[in-house]
Image (cartoon, rainbow, N blue to C red):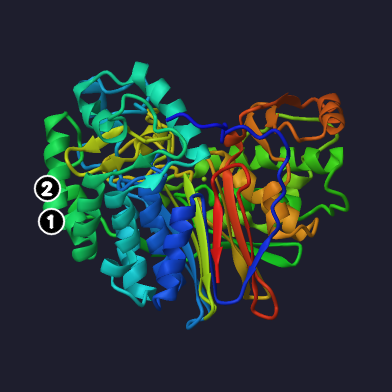
Amino acid sequence: MSQAFDSTYHRYPSARNPVFAKNGMVNTSTPQASAAGIEILKMGGNAIDAAVAAASTLTVTEPTANGLGSDAFALIWSAEDQKLYGLNASGPAPKLASLDNYRRDGKLVNGKMPKRGWGAVTVPGAVGAWAAAAKRFGKLPMTKSLAPAIRYAKDGYPVGAGLYTSWKQDYEQYLEELKGEEFREWFRTFHPLCRAWEPGEIVKLPDHAKTLREIAETQGESFYRGAIAQRIDADSKAHGGYLRAEDLAAFHPEWVEPLKVDYHGYQVCEIPPNGQGIVALMALNILSNFEFAEKECCETFHRQFEAMKIAFADGLHYVTDPKEMTIEAKRLLDPAYGRKRAAEIGDTAKLYSWDTPPGSGTVYLCCADGEGNMVSWIQSNYMGFGSCIVVKDTGIALQNRGADFSTDQDHANVIAPGKKTYHTIIPGFLMKDGRPVGPFGVMGAYMQPQGHVQVVMNYIDFHLNPQQCLDAPRWQWIRGKRFITETSFSDEIARQLKAKGHDINTELETALFGKGQMIVRLPNGVLCGGTESRYDSNIAAY
């Protein structure tokens, strides 16, 4: 489809203002998903219903990042209970997914877990998360909250510029990579034109619409213990996968107690392991031992860099299924341990190994309503389209979370039947004096805890508004002493960081730095929100 302009090219910098609202706000990475959430709020639903509507719509309008076969996590502030609840809807490895079976069946790739195909699939949890959240806190049935997603899938929606870029990159990569019969349905569903849809073209996903309707009418039961589960089982068996109907039937999302750390007068909240939110909290636990008077200075970034490396050293060593962790998560957040690790930060860049504390880890959206309920929600297929498996005639694109398991028999995160892997997707939530400030999140694999640390410090230490918290130039640790920075990052500070021993590289691809959303509730009850300026993101408010 030809246009007179290129919607992916930005000749001039664009600034967004924070958005204010009184009755409700929904921040997502596509305008359709934000509109879906607001539609449900205006229908009489609350923030939880809006989150379910937005999350289900994102499986339609941003399939490059999530799908019906995603996992999900959420932090939900209940105005009625005056309490923050955590929801972990990540699924375990199938019962047949033993390391011996992977070796016997030749499913390992150069000795590591596969990234694509049925071998990378674990039990998907997002649909279970929608049903669990709606049942416990929602006001509307899923037939209403999923109606916008069904409509967009059936009638179509126009592709945005950011979505086009992601879709095109994935198609060009997977065209060479995906050769097996198991991937045929993925090409049929998402690339019927044998190319990516261009900006402004209309996408329709009729199989997706049928499945969403069945999910809505059965409150998610069909997906795990009904006809949809049987279709997933049959497709897995047909292509040598390990996922079975029994694995789906045994799955239920878990309500968990959020982890918190005190950071300069605020409480920062994350989902406990198997998620990597604890990595963000460990970094902040270290950084709480310093005062930061200025954001744009070498010493601030140096301390952030070092704290992030230390946190990942511990997180990647310890975090796995909480039932199999060798150390209690809260020990890693002990203030004394934070002080100990902070003392290791000197004037130059270092490499860190894991340590032992003293005894005693996508799409993101956030919603708020006029009643005081607030939701921080994240769901993901992990690497782009995930496993690139689409279950025949259903539109169900399955995640590839199994790729994060280790094949080292001695590693805490080694693949095992019924085990949950280290999980990258994490929702965040800010509180102060036990009261809700608001939800925030930055998606993007291992960028996520790094993005959380940067957003939290931008808000608390440097007093930036939610939009500026997200717009500020980002950095990301890659490995060793290597960091990448956005083009807007200060060249002078980059040179100073290099002098301290950091390996700094400028990265032109903004998608590598994640996509974020943020809402804070002001003392008078007014909502103030920011959204991701690097993507098609949108705030719907009223």
Q: Is 17 placed above or below 374 here? A: above
In the rendered image, residue 278, in percent from the top left (x then y), is placed at 56, 51
Do callouts 2 and 1 mark residues in contact (Cβ within 8 Å)? yes
Residue 489 drawn at (x, y percent) = 77, 35
Residue 470, percent from left and from top: 67, 50
Towards the viewer: 422 or 325 = 422
> Which residue sits at x=50%, y=32%?
3
Query: Mark 1 packing: few (<14 Cα in 10 Å), some, or many (20+)?
Result: some
Find residue 313 and name its label. none
Horizontal side of residue 464 vs 256, given as left or right: right
The extreme front residue here reads 4
Q: At label 2, which amino acid type do we have?
A: Gln
Q: Which residue is mark 2?
A: 230
In screen coordinates, is 119 left or right of 302?
Answer: left
Question: Quick check: 393 left or right of 465?
Answer: left
Which class describes the residues within 10 Å of circle 2: few (<14), some (14-19), or many (20+)? some
The residue under label 1 is which amino acid type? Answer: Gly
Tell me residue 137's x, y (percent).
Answer: 39, 75
Q: Taking 114 as reference, is 226 above or below it?
A: below
